[in-house]
């Protein structure tokens, strides 16, 4: 066996070494480089693209080849090229000329539409067919991503200083090579086999071929990734309500007739592409290529310009199936004083395709017209005649697709686990530059070569202790403004050690129980090279009015590098709200206490410890267990000091009011030993496996959760004895152009006759202030009034319209505000039916959300209010 293995290795080396290279530059007649033009070997699956300077290269075995040079909107050229062996380079430059798209002379009547509409109607009729014509495929994907800063501000928001290592120029450059597979209905899997990140030999590219699946123009709505809105495809079922079309001409390319159609929006306010062209093949009515733009009118987030080009070509084999050959996306962005640009280019080659209907003839052309005839205005009537035929074909599409899914032998890229959409192999970043010179289909530009050379050659220096220490000296400079807003960070980057001091708003606060509170808190974090870490947070809290010192310590150990698996511990004395998950933050309570005479926070003391364990045991299923023991004591108000005295408004006692406890919620002192188990399950969760960790993605199914909390009466003198069971469900649902809906529902209750104190009740996160910490919770509900020891049901629904209405109003659409509506519901034996209805705006000044709510109790209005918070 070793002898055969050696012979095979020598054979592969010999074949690789004998390969030759053909390279050159593609330009237009004026000598301007055509960036990202496509170069393919005719009748094969081998292809590449030019770089930003118009240069290309192909590594081929010695021999004679026909190369096809293509660029969207230009006339293709087919050239005979002889490739020599032995790494000999054959230089072959090409000039492409703009294609001469010609219009057929016709008699134009005032009632006639542009011939483009008839072509688009055909493409719409065949859209679903072409969306499903490939049952499965396998391909090799090469992706290169580059992002550069053009301008870098000195400070963000005028307060946060930009680090010394952030400068104009390329800040991210990566390449990757992957094997990918596809099968209907939309299952994409990928195995990354090599990766390179400029300046980071241990880095792994975030390129992913499957991410481009959201830019399929055979779908009705496309997601750009830079906007919450979807954008209507020019050949979507209802596209003519959104676009105007103009046939600019028709030409012959590679034996097919291609129509060039200009696409413009009917209304700039619609979720549409702002300009560009789509090229349609006559007779088969498929997409030949596209070149489309999105601009500021598209309501993109932090992106000024977005341009996409796609080029399709026939798949290898006898079937009449086309596949995407290359895709290029370029963007220009502006955010927080930063300006920059970037691009992503992908080349797919080495296709192996299983067609859905292997023996299908080409789609019928319009009646009474030859396949190569330009489409005239009279074609619309012929399209109507084909609709019954197309309806029957769509039924056949569905039947054949199911059959073809069973016959996808050879489409696998290796065994991936259920839900695993991408596997990054170990050692993908260990390839040397000679390997990349061999496999890279798109040559590097001079700028990219310099970036690789400079960053790779200086990586050892940049990772050295003297260099890291010099950067840390700049980063670690103390800034009062940073401490005030976001806290102060101190780094030892070489040792991967970090210290963080909480901001002033967390260190200083005020309440009627403790008076002024000083709570300095420092978090120490130690990280490892494989993404493990541990944190330690000591804290000392002191109340100046009640003169109580409360020391505590919290620690977390993330011990698994590739998934969530951690142990947490905390011990000490804690002063906290009866509802630990309340929206009432210390800062909000401080403001309302000092300026509004409203001491909403109701606090108690607990001394003890708890330990928690969390682990994602299988994909999508996360379990967490917590065991705790605390000595709990009731607290009283010790001060009535304030800054602004509101007439007729007085502080209330430090006892929550609750309808189930009319005699008060006081408890004196007790001990509580509890155990809690929670489970969260997300069926169908997709994920990416990387050597440095696991990245969870989305799922089309909701997330289910369950909680069991048990009061262990009698254990170590515990005074509580109860059982709480709870089940929940939450999900986010995309609704196309209408926006996105999110909901969460929870139901449960206490079993039997529970023995517990008020902090053990099931609380519902309410809000009595103008400031909203979480818009997915109640906004008018009292913090404690409806907390229960019985059964309950709560539900929350938010719908984000993503500008569906406001984008149609010229003045308002410039603000990029987006509409949102919400509904909150609660029922308990004492509450009956409590409902909140809200409408509002988000993305105000990019990050603010403002809502107006009305509360109803059993159909009667019980209050209204405005809430302001973060919403973007």
Image (cartoon, rainbow, N blue to C red):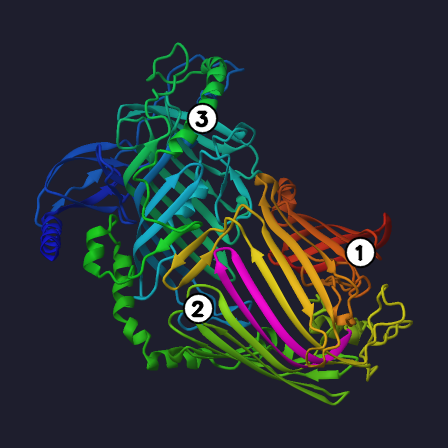
The image quadrant of residue 284 is top left
The image quadrant of residue 522 is bottom right
User: Considering the numbered disc 3 on the image, is that residue within a helix, a strand or a loop?
Assistant: helix
Q: CA distance from mark 1 to mark 2?
A: 41 Å
Please tell me whether residue 43 is drawn above or below residue 675 in the rendered image.
above
Q: Name the residue: 62% across, 73% down.
A: 627
The circle drawn on residue 399 is 3
Q: Residues within 10 Å of mark 3 (few under 14, many from 20)?
A: few
In screen coordinates, is 725 left or right of 132? right
Q: Position of residue 770 (x, y in %)?
A: 75, 62
Of 99 and 550, nearer the camera is: 550
Please tell me whether residue 604 belongs to the stretch shown in magenta. Answer: yes
The circle drawn on residue 828 is 1
Q: Name the residue: 72% across, 81% down.
A: 717
Q: Residues within 10 Å of mark 2 (few under 14, many from 20)?
A: some
Magenta-drawn segment: 602-631
Please tell me whether residue 632 is drawn above or below residue 303 in the rendered image.
below
User: Considering the numbered disc 2 on the image, is that residue within a helix, a strand or a loop?
Assistant: loop
In screen coordinates, is 812 left or right of 193? right
Magenta residues, dominant SS class: strand
Q: Position of residue 440 (x, y in %)?
A: 24, 51
Comes first in the chain, label 1 or label 3: 3
Q: Position of residue 92 (x, y in %)?
A: 15, 42
Please tell me whether residue 443 belongs to the stretch shown in magenta. Answer: no
In screen coordinates, is 436 left or right of 473? left
Q: Are marks 2 and 3 in contact (CB under 8 Å)?
A: no
């Amino acid at each position: 066996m070793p002898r055969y293995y050696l012979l095979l290795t020598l054979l592969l080396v010999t074949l690789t070494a004998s390969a030759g290279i053909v390279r050159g530059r593609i330009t237009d007649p004026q000598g301007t480089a055509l960036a990202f033009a496509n170069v393919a070997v005719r009748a094969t699956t081998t292809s590449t693209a030019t770089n930003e300077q118009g240069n290309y290269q192909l590594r081929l075995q010695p021999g004679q080849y026909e190369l096809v040079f293509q660029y969207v909107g230009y006339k293709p050229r087919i050239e005979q090229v002889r490739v020599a062996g032995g790494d000999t380079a054959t230089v072959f430059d090409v000039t492409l000329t703009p294609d001469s798209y010609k219009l057929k002379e016709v008699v134009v009547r005032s009632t006639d539409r542009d011939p483009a509409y008839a072509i688009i109607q055909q493409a719409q009729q065949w859209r679903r067919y072409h969306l499903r014509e490939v049952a499965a495929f396998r391909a090799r994907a090469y992706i290169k991503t580059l992002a550069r800063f053009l301008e870098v501000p000195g400070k963000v928001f005028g307060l946060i200083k930009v680090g010394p290592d952030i400068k104009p120029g390329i800040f991210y450059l990566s390449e990757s090579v992957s094997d990918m597979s596809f099968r209907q209905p939309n299952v994409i899997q990928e195995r990354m086999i090599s990766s390179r990140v400029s300046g980071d030999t241990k880095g792994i590219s975030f390129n992913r071929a499957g991410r481009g699946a959201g830019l399929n123009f055979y779908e009705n709505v496309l997601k750009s990734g830079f906007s919450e809105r979807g954008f209507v495809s020019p050949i979507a079922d209802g596209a003519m309500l959104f676009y105007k079309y103009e046939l600019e001409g028709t030409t012959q390319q590679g034996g097919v007739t291609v129509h060039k159609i200009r696409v413009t929006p009917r209304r700039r306010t619609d979720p549409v592409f702002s300009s560009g062209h789509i090229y349609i093949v006559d007779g088969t009515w498929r997409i030949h290529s596209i070149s489309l733009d999105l601009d500021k009118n598209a309501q993109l987030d932090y992106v000024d310009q977005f341009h996409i080009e796609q080029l399709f070509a026939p798949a290898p084999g006898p079937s009449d199936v086309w596949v995407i050959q290359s895709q290029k996306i370029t963007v220009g962005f502006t955010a927080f004083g930063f300006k920059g640009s970037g691009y992503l280019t992908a080349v797919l080659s080495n296709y192996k395709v299983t067609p859905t209907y292997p023996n299908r003839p080409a789609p019928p052309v319009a009646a009474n017209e030859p396949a190569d005839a330009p489409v005239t205005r009279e074609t619309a009537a012929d399209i109507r005649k084909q609709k019954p035929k197309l309806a029957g074909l769509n039924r056949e599409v569905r039947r054949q697709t199911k059959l073809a899914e069973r016959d996808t032998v050879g489409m696998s890229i290796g065994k991936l686990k259920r839900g695993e959409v991408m596997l990054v192999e170990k050692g993908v970043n260990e390839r040397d530059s000679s390997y990349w010179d061999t496999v890279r289909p798109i040559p590097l530009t001079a700028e990219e070569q310099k970036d690789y050379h400079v960053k790779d050659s200086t990586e050892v220096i940049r990772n050295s202790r003297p260099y890291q220490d010099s950067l840390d000296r700049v980063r670690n400079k103390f800034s009062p403004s940073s401490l005030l807003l976001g806290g102060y960070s101190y780094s030892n980057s070489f040792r991967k050690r970090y210290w963080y001091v909480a901001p002033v708003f967390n260190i200083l606060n005020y309440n009627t129980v403790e008076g002024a509170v000083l709570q300095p808190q420092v978090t120490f974090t130690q990280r490892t090279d494989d993404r493990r870490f541990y944190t330690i947070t000591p804290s000392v809290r002191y109340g100046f009015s009640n003169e109580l010192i409360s020391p505590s310590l919290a620690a977390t150990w993330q011990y698994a590098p590739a998934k969530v698996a951690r142990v947490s511990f905390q011990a000490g004395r804690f002063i906290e709200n009866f509802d630990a998950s309340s929206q009432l933050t210390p800062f909000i309570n401080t403001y309302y206490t000092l300026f509004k005479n409203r001491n909403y926070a109701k606090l108690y003391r607990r001394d003890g410890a708890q330990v928690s364990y969390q682990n994602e045991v299988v994909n999508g299923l996360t379990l967490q267990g917590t065991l705790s023991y605390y000595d709990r004591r009731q607290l009283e108000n010790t001060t009535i000091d304030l800054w602004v005295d509101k007439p007729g408004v007085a502080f209330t006692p430090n006892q929550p009011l609750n309808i189930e406890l009319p005699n008060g919620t006081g408890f004196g002192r007790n001990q509580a030993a509890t155990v809690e188990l929670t489970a969260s399950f997300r069926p169908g969760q997709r994920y990416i496996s990387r050597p440095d960790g696991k990245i969870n993605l989305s799922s089309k199914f909701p997330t289910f959760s369950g909680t069991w909390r048990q009061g262990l009466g009698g254990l170590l003198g515990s005074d509580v004895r109860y059982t709480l069971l709870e089940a929940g469900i939450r999900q986010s649902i995309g609704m196309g152009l209408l926006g996105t809906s999110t909901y969460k529902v929870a139901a449960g209750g206490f079993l039997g006759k529970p023995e517990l104190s008020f902090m053990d009740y099931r609380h519902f996160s309410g809000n009595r202030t103008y400031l909203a910490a979480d818009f997915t919770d109640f906004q008018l509900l009292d913090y404690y009034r409806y907390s229960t020891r019985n059964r309950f049901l709560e539900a929350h629904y938010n719908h984000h319209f993503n500008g569906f209405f406001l984008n149609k109003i010229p003045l308002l659409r410039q603000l990029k505000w987006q509409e949102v509506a919400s509904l909150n519901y609660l029922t308990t034996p004492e509450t009956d039916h409590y409902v909140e209805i809200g409408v509002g705006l988000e993305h105000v000044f990019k990050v603010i959300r403002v809502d107006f709510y009305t509360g109803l109790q059993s159909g009667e209005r019980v209050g209204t209010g405005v809430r302001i918070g973060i919403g973007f």
